[in-house]
Amino acid sequence: MGRFRTVQGPLDMSEALTEKDLRKREIAIARKYADRLPWEAVAWGLGNLLVWLSLWPLVFLGVMPLWLGFIIATFNVMLCYLPSHEAQHDIIGRKGTKWRWLNEFVGHVSTIPLVLPYRVAKLTHIQHHLHANDPALDPDYSSMAGGPWQAIWKSIQNRQPGADGGFNKYGDVLQDIGRPDALIDGALFQLAHFGILIALAWSGYALEAALLWWLPRQIGLTYIQFFLSWAPHHPADKTGRYKDTRAFKSAWGNIGSMGMQYHIVHHLHPYIPLTDTPRAYREMRDILEQRDCRLEGI
């Protein structure tokens, strides 16, 4: 049985612990935060969608100026993915429980502003967890770049026509895992999205369509791919349970980085609600140190 170096801390370990001991302590901490319905994620996902939907009549009726609607819509898109992400991991309601319908409802509707179907998001995200940082198998590997500005540019490049990264990569992943049926969801979402934009432009609302949906989606995609894909895994040169992601100190803080400072906890125990990962991290930090995880400045 392998041995790890001694670390002084809350666990008060006087001697190195075995792999079995470390694993047992880690799971005990993680289970403290399991099986809690994160009502904050439900309110976040549904509330954010309702705010975005309300912008359209408010702007069209002249109650709200378009410039303000654009700013709010941009934040709406930035914020819309994570509630669905909780649902993708069945955190809101597992199969067979009374809250399963709510889990699926939040998963499906919260990402409408992002134009990302729930089934596509869930199937590809599970593949990311199974193959994080694998250049051939990780659906999000195309987000990797040498630095922050390169990551932003890479995100923009990946959504150009003919690009083979970003969301364009998801079609290949779904084919490879035998779920081409989910491509229908993607096609319907795209047709509806562009159909609505074209109809609005044809009706004389081209600027409203651009500033309440098209441009906020572009900005939101860049933000989400930067903080959820690039930052937690950079430089994405290692694979394995304790090596494929990290904890890091963001200049934007934990809220500004959408909780990704503690992304290592999510990859280790994806059933822990997002808002509980900081506390779980603080409790298991000594264990992660013993495992030589990347804990950078936090």
Image: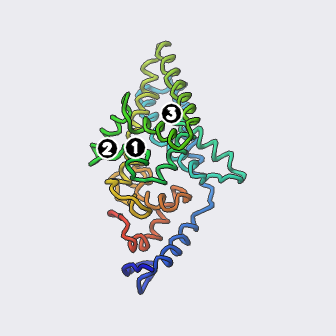
Q: Which residue is pictured at 46% across the width and 29% down the height? A: 213
| Distance between mark 2 and mark 3 Cα atoms | 21 Å
Choose between 154 and 248: the one closer to the eye. Answer: 154
**What residue is shown with label 1?**
225
Query: Which label's residue is closer to the chain start, 2 or 3?
Result: 3
Looking at the rendered structure, the kind of residue marked 1 is Gln
For the residues labelled 1 and 3, say whether their Cβ atoms are less than 8 Å apart.
Answer: no
Query: Which label's residue is closer to the chain start, 2 or 1?
Result: 2
Looking at the rendered structure, the kind of residue marked 2 is Ala
Q: Where is residue 295 in the image (x, y as percent from the top left)?
A: 36, 65
Query: Which numbered dot is residue 151?
Result: 2
Query: Which label's residue is closer to the chain start, 1 or 3?
Result: 3
Query: Which numbered dot is residue 254?
Result: none
Position of residue 181 in the picture relative to residue 165 (left or right): right
Q: Where is residue 143 in the image (x, y as percent from the top left)?
A: 36, 44
Position of residue 153 in the picture relative to residue 210 (left or right): left
**What residue is shown with label 3?**
115
Look at the numbered disc 3 and give the secondary structure of its residue: loop
Q: Residues within 10 Å of mark 2 (few under 14, many from 20)?
A: many
Q: Where is residue 236 in the image (x, y as percent from the top left)?
A: 34, 54
For the residues labelled 2 and 1, say whether their Cβ atoms are less than 8 Å apart.
Answer: yes
Look at the numbered disc 1 and give the secondary structure of its residue: helix
